[in-house]
Amino acid sequence: MSVDIGIIGLPQSGRTTIFNGLTRGKVDTGSHAPKGLAPHIGIAKVPEPRFQILADMLQPKRLVPAEIRYIDIGASVKDLVKDETISGQLLTQLSNVDALINVVRAFTDDRIPHVEGSLDVARDIATTDLELTFSDLTIIERRLKKIELSLKGAKPPERQGLLREQETLTKIKADLEKDVPIRELKLTTDEARLITSYQFLTAKPLLIAVNIGEEQLPEAASLEAELNAHYSRPHSRVTTVCGKLEMELGQLDNSAAEEFRVGFGLKESGLDRITKSAYELLEIITFFTIASAEIKAWPIQNGTNALKAAGKIHSDMERGFIRAEVISYHDLVKSGSLAEARKKGLLRLEGKNYIVQEGDVITFLFNV
Ligand SMILES: Nc1nc2c(ncn2[C@@H]2O[C@H](COP(=O)(O)OP(=O)(O)OP(=O)(O)O)[C@@H](O)[C@H]2O)c(=O)[nH]1
Ligand SMILES: [Mg+2]
């Protein structure tokens, strides 16, 4: 699966700065000037600490990490509900992402006026939530009107479907009006299926990235715990990140960045924490393949079976699936090599319905 994450937030909250940090990009930041609505799109390689150990053991020619595509939306969330052309374009950029990152400003800088006149993390989180809710409500209301019209001339089988949709949307609308986002609703499988095509924004997992200043770094962990106690809801969580620092570190090579990080007393990069949180929110696990001197990390949704996992690699592998040869990362490391693991009988043959586990090393056997 490719994982796509949309970056949203209020104007001048540091969205593009964080985008640059995440993707090692060099897009201009801090430009108030009116710009086109084109989004910035960039790729981040997912850090994988197990790679080095596998590489030392298996001496591959290449290590291929999983990737996340980040999309820095072409305008602020405040534009989502402006006029229909703008909101339409923004929605197109947002509707296909798997999760959202809401960048909220917490850094102080007198040279950069806050759009709302003052610094207030809680207020800004609520503002963005409201814009997303508003966007979903607009879509629902439009659809409900259409359904009502269609019902007038509908024949019985079509009528059934329309009534079911009307019922579900009406229920969701009532919750949204009480400020309950769709991601927090307990929908039945049928209801969830019925609304997937709408790609509602409040249905997407949400990571709130509180953009702190360098001087707040020492309190980052306690601030994060405090914020999570307040705002961590189903399929949502909060992380702190110092956008400016991460963007600067993103321009350095890994070892230099690491040195700086240690200097700042940071255990882990803010960007790695964002990636980790995104994986957790999306319930993504990683499996590995080792083939033609390449070790690759693949992201899949937890609960995926071997057949579907093969399909992520190549449709031929899914179509011609025979078996999967599986060993856990830990068993492989313990054995020291695939040959040794095979001798010890630690390689299992699994069928289509085997549920892939975190850290599985898999060779798919297929026939086309
Ligand atoms: N001091 C400080 N400044 C920051 C930080 N993050 C961003 N900035 C500054 O805030 C300004 C806005 O940052 P951007 O990344 O352009 O913010 P944005 O949300 O993309 O802004 P627009 O797309 O123009 O609405 C820039 O001048 C940044 O340098 C931070 O952590 N600390
Ligand atoms: Mg920007």
Image: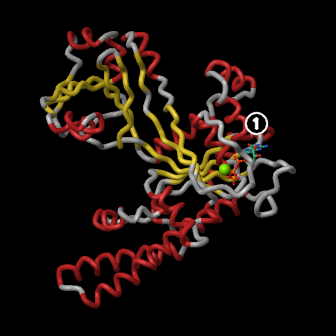
* Horizontal side of residue 76 vs 198, given as left or right: right
Picture quarter with the C terminus? top left
Q: Quadrant of the N terminus?
A: top left
SS class of the residue under badge 1?
Answer: helix
In the rendered structure, which amino acid carries the disc numbered 1? Pro
Q: Quadrant of residue 76?
A: bottom right
> In the image, 235: left or right of 21?
left
Residue appearing at x 29%, y 86% in the figure: 151
- Report whether 158 appears left or right of 328: left
Residue at 31% of width from left, 63% of height from top?
A: 193
Q: Is residue 159 above or below residue 189?
A: below
Q: Which residue is mark 1?
A: 218
x and y percentages locating residue 296 in the rendered image: 37, 25
**Coordinates of residue 219 in the picture (x, y in percent):** 74, 40
Instruction: Give the residue displayed 86% in from the left and 49% down from the top.
Output: 111
Q: Would you say the beta carbon of the disc 1 residue lies within 8 angstroms of ligand 1?
A: no
At x 20%, y 37%, the residue is 318
Q: Nearer the viewer, residue 81 or 168?
A: 81
Q: Position of residue 132 (x, y in %)?
A: 55, 65
Instruction: Determine the residue located farthest toward the bottom in the rendered image.
Output: 152
Q: Residue furthest right?
A: 110
Give the image location of residue 60, x and y in percent.
38, 13
Q: Is residue 231 visible?
A: no
